[in-house]
Image (cartoon, helix red, strand yellow):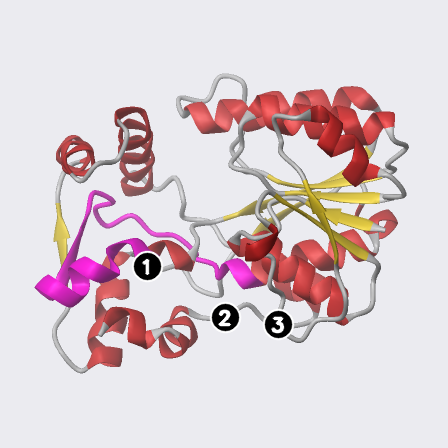
Amino acid sequence: MILVTGATGKVGAEAVRMLAARQHPTRALVRDPSRASYGDAAEVDIAVGDFDRPETLDAAMRGVDTVLLVTPSRPDQEIAIIDSAVGNGVAHIVKITNHKATADSPVERRRDHARIEAHLASTGLAYTLLAPNLFMQNLFAVAPTIRQTGGFTMSAGEGRFAMVDARDVGATAAACAAAPDKHAGRTYLLTGPELIGYTEVAAELTRALGREIEYRRISPAQHREAMIEAGVPEAVASSNAQVFGLIADGDAAWRSEDIAAITGTPPRSLRAFLAENLAAFR
């Protein structure tokens, strides 16, 4: 049995669909069962639980061999899941992480991942780490601005990244969870097929929509203030602006062939992603 946490999110939901479609016994850990919809996938066992209630985690872990660990990266929550897995005889954890997670990182969320990884390593469990680049689905956050103003604002300068579709991350996670021994002790970098920047994103949107879409550059400090004005919590806005500043400095300019090597299928390009989701940007 494979347990998928965060099973209604972008990565977790796709992993559940892929695992169930291949008839792997799959359990989805969710807070709201009404959101647990997996299309035409085979039957999925639904476990209702809460990361902050350890007793619900223990119930979800019963009979589980492998956990696919997908959360908003709160150390207390992920450590609780790891401890529950240890206590219930789980053999392997596949964790979504950040490939620049270090204890001395300037980015808090990366320090959080490093703390979780250190705890996971200390348990003796077998594990696999998956580190995605920027998600294509993040573009949905600027879709309303694109529709209303014909452009979007970012503070990533001319920084480049290998933006990846979350569905490809979910498919890779499912493949690792389905054959954990094959991937034990490995860290995989999950990226799209090309290094691009927001200039190229604007160009692809322009081509797809048939009208000019502008990439408006601002500084990370300006971006932080704009996010706060839009209602983003100050701590989150500060962290996001910090990350965009790092992207501008080349922090995300890396890509790999790991998705194709693991799944046998090349990752989606930005052009393919936009073609599938064009209505969101019209």
Q: Is residue 201 magenta?
A: no
Q: Which mark lies nearer to you, 1 or 2? A: 1
Mark 2 sits on what residue?
Answer: 268
Q: Residue at x 55, y 63 (%)?
A: 167
Residue at x 21%, y 60% (from the top left corner) = 144
Binning the other alpha carbons within 10 Å of mark 2 as few (below 14), some (14 to 19) or many (20 upward) gives some
> Dot 3 surroundings within 10 Å: few (below 14), some, or many (20 or more)?
few
Measure how far apart labels 2 and 3 are at the Cα level: 21 Å
Q: Residue furthest bottom?
A: 210
Looking at the rendered structure, which numbered label has been put on residue 39? Answer: 3
**Observer-nearest residue: 58 or 243?**
58
| Mark 1 residue type | Phe
The answer to whether any part of residue 185 appears in the image is no
Which-is-in-front pick, marks 3 and 1? 3
Q: Which residues are magenta?
A: 139-167
Residue drawn at x 62%, y 31% is 51
Q: Point out which mark residue 140 bears.
A: 1
In-front residue for pair 60/82 = 60
Q: Amino acid at mark 2?
A: Arg
Residue type of the residue flagged with mark 3: Gly
